[in-house]
Image (spheres, helix red, strand yellow):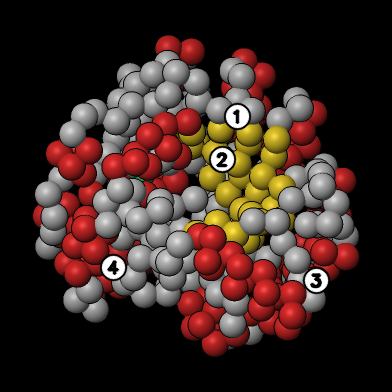
Amino acid sequence: MDYFKKVNQAVPSFDERVGYELKTKNEIDTLQLNITRTCNLSCKHCHLSCHPNRTEDMSQDVANKCIDLLKSYNFKTVDITGGAPEMSGVFKYLVEESTKLGKNVMIRSNLTIYNDEKYKDIPIFLKNHKVDIIASLPFYEKDKTDKMRGLGVFEDSIRVLRRLNDLGYARDPNLNLNLVYNPSGAIIPQAEQELEAIYRTKLLEEYGIVFNDLFVITNSPIGNFGKWLDKSNNLDRYMKRLYNAFNDKIVDDVMCRSTLSVDYDGNLHDCDFNLSLGMGIRSKNKNIFEITAKDLEKRPIATANHCYSCTAGAGSS
Ligand code: SF4
Ligand code: SF4
């Protein structure tokens, strides 16, 4: 049986547990752009199974349509992700055009890409455009980080974090540097505040590094991580943990309620997880070349049992 069928059979359905049809808010404020599947890393928890040999990349035509959409609809934030978004041919274009339109621009970075000669100029480019950086650092210690992301990744990340601090990131109020933690096994992360305090102390005392906020992510049981859960016989246990940790107080704030996610090929999704599963938006038009203002009105969200990772415990940032 395919692992995703097991995700949906392990516990009662997410829709039943929520008890009503989950819908977007009246206004969607974030346009998320997933512009490439290429990445210099190949992490075992990657929900999009990205790696250096993947070639899917957003075309200039799709990028132009994204900018047209930003001009015609009042998104406040543009969230650029991948893969390693910096490796995409349209990365700089999207940052430049989005900032010209006055949008808050954030990018999701694995940090290590900035050690590559070809991408060494990107931190200064980001600083000049006042782009917020959301940087993955799965743990504040070398062993756990390297186990998840590959040998040497922790030290490479620390080197880049120091460089970002030197450029003013997390020191200048206009240059935000947020870190992302996600656990390495079939567990639900501890509370954000406790973990943030530990990260802050460890990174400052041991490496002289500062950051703004720590975002805690619960791994979604899909992609590489879903397959690993299945293969290691952890899938059932993990789904039960997510189900038992369901917190109805955070359902209103799950990110799909205020986000539209565009894939590299222009297909539209409620979030990056649905994008990874190929679950399109529940609207007549499902691609950026077809979208109308009506598609952005309040609409039902496509849900399944992977959604339990967004509602477990204190929620997933
Ligand atoms: S999790 Fe991030 S850094 Fe790791 S392979 Fe996927 S996109 Fe790359
Ligand atoms: S997985 Fe996506 S659709 Fe499901 S609750 Fe989370 S953000 Fe919403």
For the question of whether residue 229 can be seen, the reply is yes
**Which residue is identified by label 2?**
33
**Which residue is identified by label 3?**
162
Image: 293 above or below 282: above
How would you rate the neighbour count of disc 3 (Cα within 10 Å): few for under 14, some for 14-19, many for 20 or more? some
Q: Are marks 1 and 2 in contact (CB under 8 Å)?
A: yes
Q: Earlier in the sequence, mark 2 or mark 3?
A: 2
Locate residue 93: give its quadrant. top right
Q: Along the horizontal axis of the image, is 298 left or right of 228? A: right
**Which residue is identified by label 1?**
66
Real-space CA distance between mark 1 and mark 3, rounded to the nearest whole angstrom:
33 Å
Q: Earlier in the sequence, mark 1 or mark 2?
A: 2
The percent position of residue 232, horizontal first and vertical second, equals: 24, 78
State yes or no: Cβ of the residue under disc 3 lies below 8 Å from any atom of ligand 1. no
Residue type for callout 1? Cys
The percent position of residue 133, horizontal first and vertical second, equals: 69, 53
The percent position of residue 231, horizontal first and vertical second, equals: 23, 75
Locate residue 245: give its quadrant. bottom left
Residue lying at 30% horizontally and 48% vertically, measured from the top left? 247
Residue type for callout 3? Arg
Q: Are marks 4 and 3 in contact (CB under 8 Å)?
A: no
Residue lying at 87% horizontally and 46% vertically, measured from the top left? 128
Q: Earlier in the sequence, mark 4 or mark 3?
A: 3
Real-space CA distance between mark 2 and mark 3, rounded to the nearest whole angstrom:
27 Å
Front tag of 4 and 3 = 3
Locate residue 193: give its quadrant. bottom right
Q: Earlier in the sequence, mark 1 or mark 3?
A: 1
Element on which disc 1 rests: helix
Image: 81 above or below 255: below
